[in-house]
Image (cartoon, rainbow, N blue to C red):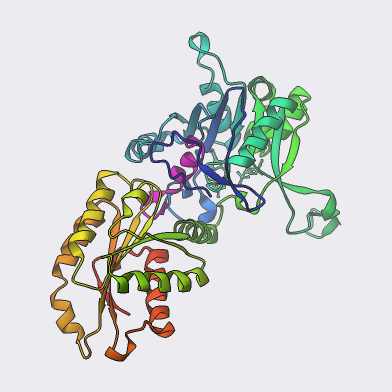
Amino acid sequence: MNLSSDPDRSGQPECSSRHGGRHKATSGVHFTVSVVLPAGGTGERTGLVTPKQFYMFLNRPLISYTIQAFERLSWIQHIVVVVAEESIALTRDIVQRFQHTKVRVVSGGATRHRSIFNGVQALDPGESAATPDVVIIHDAVRPFVEEDFLLEIAMAAKENGASGAIRPLVSTVIATTSEGYLDHSLERGKYRASEMPQGFLYGVIHQAYQKCSEFDFDFGTECLHLALQHTGTRAKLIEGPPTLWKVTYKRDLAAAESIIKETLCRSACVTSDGSKRARELGRCLQKVMASLDMELDVLPEPIGDASRLSKEWNFIKLFVNGSGLSEVEETVKALEAANRALLHPVVVVWVRLDTSDGMSVSETGAGHLPLMELASAAKLQNILLYGIHFLLSEEDAGFSEGSVKRLAELTYTLIHDRNALLAGQMLCA
Ligand SMILES: Nc1ccn([C@@H]2O[C@H](COP(=O)(O)OP(=O)(O)OP(=O)(O)O)[C@@H](O)[C@H]2O)c(=O)n1
Ligand SMILES: O=P(O)(O)OC[C@@H](O)[C@@H](O)[C@@H](O)CO
């Protein structure tokens, strides 16, 4: 999953290649590409009342994550989101609230194929404009799709007429007799699971749906099959990464939330009051956090996080001399002004170092009403502000490994969990 750091989504975001490297995607796409996101289902297999495409992750519905995965790509022109009639208003509200672009919402059908066909037809504006060269079809409940794989699918569709993502089978496929006994099993190595995204020349998928039967519409699950059966187009199959999986069962919701949280806590920007001691603490914290797989960028200049506001999801502010709450407030206001927390909650951790022995929590607690007030206001902007009292005894002035580890683990947990209920709390490390 890529979190476009570009708030206005105009740039080419970084994308993590399937080989682990991170590089700027150079699209090289010299044809038009539009997308159909079928989202008209009821998500019965999750067992939830709310259809899974509207399930909230960190205050944002699943469908918004998938839309963002496509709209951030400059080489994609239009995105048609296909939803049930009764969800059209909700979906249009989501598009407006999260400032999605390129999106058109249309009504779906009783089956996935009927919904997809409605989406494909919506891409044909008639005389007013041209249809896209290539259509990417992608289940709206598959939010983790990377740019480099989408490029492969689009290029292969342009060249071959159709393309599709595949993954190795995890379980063996077997056929049963009508009495429920084993009839035969398939040689697993010869088969693959068909996933999404899939790509088609517009004419191929449009013709396939125009020629398919009512049985296809009501019981089919494979667009690639329709393209072959009704247009003779044999899709190019491309093995995709494991993150292409479809949110289907309740367990998948927990897995999706875990991936989203993991993606948001890979780095943090550390600033301080500029004192020697605070900078030393920043360096010690950086070392320990690296063992927690979080990359800390310790900025030399005091309170210098302005340069990171447009691309960082986490800010740690270290203060040795004095409160620092006013500087924290400045950071919060800058994040609000940049509308930085529109798509994901941003975390600010305020760390106050105290070396006075025997300071009781009640003594420290008295000074933290301002924190709670600031945090309550910030939470309304999706900014989560936490305080940590880093208490050191007089003899521990050198930041022992144990004390820094305590601070690092607490800080990491706050950033990873993004628990809104803890916002405004002053914890002790
Ligand atoms: N009439 C339908 C049925 C499904 N879909 C969409 O097709 C994608 C994949 O389908 P699936 O995972 O089966 O979704 P549901 O049909 O909602 O799930 P369930 O079968 O558990 O009800 C989903 O994004 C779903 O919203 C659709 O657009 N129109
Ligand atoms: O059958 P469902 O509607 O649950 O999900 C659709 C999947 O079958 C489909 O997304 C891939 O298998 C590719 O065709």
Residue at 14%, 69% in the rendered image: 369
64 is within the stretch colored magenta = yes
Q: Position of residue 330 (x, y in %)?
A: 21, 54
Q: Position of residue 104 (x, y in %)?
A: 44, 28
Q: Position of residue 232 (x, y in %)?
A: 79, 24
**Of residues 30 and 184, which is closer to you in this image?**
30
8 left or right, relative to 120: left
Residue 31 picture quarter: top right
Query: Which quadrant: the C terminus?
Result: bottom left
Q: Position of residue 358 (x, y in %)?
A: 21, 91
The span picked out in magenta is 56-72
**Vertical side of 354 occupied by 310: above or below:** above
**Vertical side of 279 occupied by 101: above or below:** above
Residue at 46%, 45% in the rendered image: 65
**Of residues 41 and 131, which is closer to you in this image?**
131
290 is within the stretch colored magenta = no
Q: How many marks?
A: 0
Ligand 1 image-quadrant field? top right
**Of residues 386 and 304, which is closer to you in this image?**
304
Q: Residue furthest front?
A: 276
Residue at 39%, 79% in the rendered image: 404
Residue 410 picture quarter: bottom left
Residue at 30%, 53% in the rendered image: 382
